[in-house]
Amino acid sequence: MIDFRPFYQQIATSNLSAWLETLPLQLKRWEKQTHGEYAKWAKVIDFLPQLSAERIDLKQAVRAESDTPLSEGQRQRLIYHLKQLMPWRKGPYHLHGVHIDCEWRSDFKWERVLPHLAPLRDRTVLDVGCGSGYHMWRMLGEGAATVIGIDPTELFLCQFEAVRKLLNNDRRANLIPLGIEEMQALGVFDTVFSMGVLYHRKSPLDHLTQLRSQLRPGGELVLETLVVEGDVNTVLVPADRYAKMKNVYFIPSVDCLINWLQKTGFHNVRCVDVATTSLQEQRKTEWLENESLIDFLDPQDQSKTVEGYPAPQRAVILANK
Amino acid sequence: MIDFRPFYQQIATSNLSAWLETLPLQLKRWEKQTHGEYAKWAKVIDFLPQLSAERIDLKQAVRAESDTPLSEGQRQRLIYHLKQLMPWRKGPYHLHGVHIDCEWRSDFKWERVLPHLAPLRDRTVLDVGCGSGYHMWRMLGEGAATVIGIDPTELFLCQFEAVRKLLNNDRRANLIPLGIEEMQALGVFDTVFSMGVLYHRKSPLDHLTQLRSQLRPGGELVLETLVVEGDVNTVLVPADRYAKMKNVYFIPSVDCLINWLQKTGFHNVRCVDVATTSLQEQRKTEWLENESLIDFLDPQDQSKTVEGYPAPQRAVILANK
Amino acid sequence: MIDFRPFYQQIATSNLSAWLETLPLQLKRWEKQTHGEYAKWAKVIDFLPQLSAERIDLKQAVRAESDTPLSEGQRQRLIYHLKQLMPWRKGPYHLHGVHIDCEWRSDFKWERVLPHLAPLRDRTVLDVGCGSGYHMWRMLGEGAATVIGIDPTELFLCQFEAVRKLLNNDRRANLIPLGIEEMQALGVFDTVFSMGVLYHRKSPLDHLTQLRSQLRPGGELVLETLVVEGDVNTVLVPADRYAKMKNVYFIPSVDCLINWLQKTGFHNVRCVDVATTSLQEQRKTEWLENESLIDFLDPQDQSKTVEGYPAPQRAVILANK
Amino acid sequence: MIDFRPFYQQIATSNLSAWLETLPLQLKRWEKQTHGEYAKWAKVIDFLPQLSAERIDLKQAVRAESDTPLSEGQRQRLIYHLKQLMPWRKGPYHLHGVHIDCEWRSDFKWERVLPHLAPLRDRTVLDVGCGSGYHMWRMLGEGAATVIGIDPTELFLCQFEAVRKLLNNDRRANLIPLGIEEMQALGVFDTVFSMGVLYHRKSPLDHLTQLRSQLRPGGELVLETLVVEGDVNTVLVPADRYAKMKNVYFIPSVDCLINWLQKTGFHNVRCVDVATTSLQEQRKTEWLENESLIDFLDPQDQSKTVEGYPAPQRAVILANK
């Protein structure tokens, strides 16, 4: 099983130390009720070879290279193990000659978001709903001091730990398998990311309040979520599914979202990017057996989902506490 | 202090008996942290005379009359005591010659709602956010077997108990000082009312889910709340105050509200009434020292609130579990 | 399953009403984790015939008689059902021609205890470790107003409810399946019995404190337990078993026990009876398949247990809060 | 206030790491409800000079010496600060020329206990009821790897931290302000000391069980407590005070105590020392304003306490889990 004790040691004397009041007990309880597959996935990490990379690039990509490349047999074994952790949704990763070509080109999103951020150098960062952690490595690539991702899905934790092992076991980033609503309000992060989470929350205002409670005064929120066209009073609530996803609740317009953030107490709220998700950004690869965006859109009219709602469009909003 | 033990006795062998698992402990804790004025207000109830009414009308009004009317001195003393419990918001009450002329003509609302309801005869009814309980008495007037109101405000509890005492101490209705979010899911009520509550909830979908959890399968929800004009995607979220009220969150259109109810799992959802609140329905009286509707509207244009939002308009929606 | 709701109704407006703060939730949790046999035992109670007794004697015995005696076939069926609830440890019961001849002649103990008690007439009584409840009925026979027994063993509860059904469903006595250490401190009982419990407690002083917390000021404690000969400093702690019983901890001398009671805050502490348990009082019958006293004593020397400790000797101590 | 975060960091990756599940939250709550004087005492530690000792002796005494002794003025200031933390009960300490001559010559007890112990070298040790921590330093002097003391008294914590600061801020020993009954069962200590605690426990068997739950299998218990003369069945329970102490419960004979330990599941139980406390070992000094042993004994007969009980006699018992 995955060992969180080195993380406890890291935070014990940091500004995250108060988290020790709740986290170790929560993770002990979490471990007791993990998914049946978790033990199997965690074992995959043990099976991965202990490789040493001479070159790590987190600035332009998430890439590890060694002076002595793997033999083709070693590479195939590495692919075999990593495919035990499918589906790989967020990427891509280039690790010792293996290209994990994930469903999402998360680097596209990063390119859209990064230019607008307060510089991440030396910052303590929280990434809510971090998935396999792709952006967490890119945050380190920008000089962040510490990056914490939270995501309750066991598979993503195991993907993250597999990638970490192949990145020379870098411990500056850590994924904690909790939901934001379970997380103690720490009020110390310099930057908090919530990307692709808000529309899954039954109570969006509570989600914004929880995000705010993790920021230090003056800290920066980076909120990315689905939006629709419309004025300050426009919110789409899908009656049932949206793009075949269950658990989609509120999809506001950009103006509406800005209003919500102001009502929650954020300052300096501004939208820095709106983009329609392209079939290049989200698509089926060999690292994914499930359906992808092409299957979620109306085959007659790709501007609509199969349910007839507007096709996915995503905005990035920044705000300060 | 107000004694809830007769209520516990009433429910112990009824279909509400499971409530004993949580309610007595909750009310004990509630009592320990009541508002400083609560003890004073509760004493007012003791000071009220023990009057016996020969004629009680709950069908056309809330009225108690005795064959021997009070002397003018007695009547003035009764008024004196009842005014200790100001402000009186929901009414009117006609009790032994005293006309409690409250801010709200709640009988107007009742007239609009009643014709559309499944008959209340013999029903077990929950009234969420019941205020002083005016509608609870009217529900009994329609033949309801048991009416439970919940409202966390101590003053309303004391107003309710004062009225009860003057209604021959009728124990078929009971006010429990809890919020809906604290109340154990009982799943047994035939009819659940939530009137004037939804727009005060930070998470309207959670509110609807809580209301649903109190209904028996097939039971009827009566939802009354502020609405705006618009289509299924229209929701007003006031940036700050609305009609000078703090804590106003979501004001949807009727279509939007219907959509939310369907998404929450309600069937047979239909809007039966939409009405703009008139200056006859909500106004200042001698039983109220605060401001009222006239003060909340733009003096130049009564179709707008002082903040410039549409003036209050309220819809009644029925739905079944 | 056994329905405790009539009991909740009984206590709701009595001086036991505060118990509603904890009891319903505790019993709900208790029911979820009952012994696998409990459902079967509870069904036995349903199978018992609904008989009406013209004559009930609780003063001289626990006896129910009808003007029309059962046929032999009916009697055999009654015996058959009652034997599903074996072993019967505390008795005897005489119910509609069936003599439940239990392991213990609990009437012997009652004869020794009763003459010393403050009269039970109109008292609210608690019997801690009540077993099948034999003494509870005898307490009612002495005029007690309400008798509550507590004992966590599911079988005893079912035996109690079976006897109750054959005693015209008398509801003045109630058995609650809790241990004393789980029971809310009520501080209202006039008399508290703890017979045959203290030596099973790992912490005897905590047991005495718990008993005291159930008494009203001035109330009477009736404590019966195993004792040894010795002075104020003498306590036998069996290294392993005592008379083949596991979980025997402290067996003090009478003087030692009196000292403990005084230290715990009791007044007017006095020993009113010491008796060696005879082979007539505790013995094997057809209502019991297990071993009994004769098997627990040294066959060569009946003044000793098989482990070589002094044979069981029991004292009755009275004290006031 | 005293900062426990370095301790959390120390244990995070040790065999004590499971303690993080409960300790940080317990200590946060503890801090909120500390004694009014605690803040003042904690400040005394800040006022103490940061001295560097070239010679630390923990093997023969608890002594810190510098190559450059303090000036007389500096020494007087040091004495002044340390006396803010009176009464000093357990010692003596020799710190930079200041001799803290405590009520108890705890070195006497250590001389009696040490020869019998399994060697402490490299052991993880728990000292329950550690007082100011005198023995903890001596355990380090014997080569223990880590020593944890627990004692809920805030003053002792501050005395401990003051001594630690004057011992070059040695962090191998740590005092945690909890009672043993609040401490999570860790089951990892090689040696557990309980000296002077058992007779203050209302339930001695529960205390022994708690001590056992902290030991690793095979670990050693060192139990020191008051004893009386007598056989396996002899236990003195003072009716009120003993040697003017409140809260004295069970004072067993040595044989009785051995029996209790065996019953609790300990093996290899043996008494290694019995000693009457002398007036040299416990006496009044200038570091103590309270009464001491001389005041607790019968002036006519020093073999008795003022209450007429046998004068204090203490045994040391060793046992293994």
Image (cartoon, coloured by chain):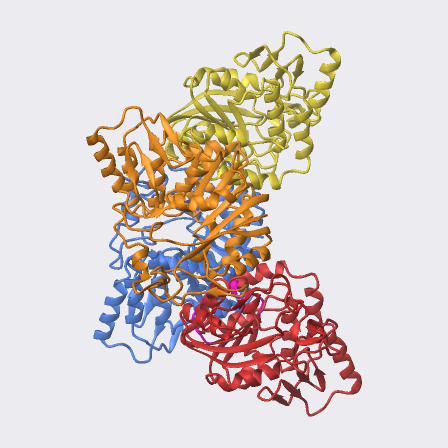
Chain colours: A red, B orange, C yellow, D blue
Q: Is residue D188 magenta?
A: no
Examine the rendered structure and indicate whether residue B92 appears above or below residue D94.
above
Q: Is residue C188 above or below residue A204?
A: above
Screen quadrant of the C terminus of chain A: bottom left
Which sits in the foreground, C168 or B200?
B200
C197 or D203, nearer to the observer: C197
> What is the number of callouts on the image?
0
Q: Residue A178 in magenta?
A: yes
- Vertical arrangement, residue B118 with respect to residue D19, above or below: above
Residue C64 horizontal side relative to residue C126, left or right? right
Query: Going 29% across and 38% down the picture, which residue do you hit?
Result: B99
Residue C204 appears left or right of B40: right
Residue D67: percent from left, percent from top:
33, 80
| Boundaries of the magenta span | A176-191
Q: Residue furthest right?
A: A73
| Residue occupying the far left of the picture | B73
Q: Quadrant of residue A275?
A: bottom right
Tell which residue pokes out farthest to the bottom in this image: A67
The answer to whether residue C144 is left or right of residue B217 is left
Q: Along the line of sight, which residue is nearer the eye, B159 or B101? A: B101
Q: From where the camera sits, is residue D180 visible?
A: yes
- Residue C60, quarter of picture: top right
Residue A281 location in percent, x, y?
65, 81
Q: Report x, y in % for residue C253.
A: 47, 29
Quadrant placement of the N terminus of chain A: bottom right
Residue B191 position within the rendered picture, expressed as x and y whole percent measured from the top left: 52, 42
Q: Quadrant location of residue A287? A: bottom right
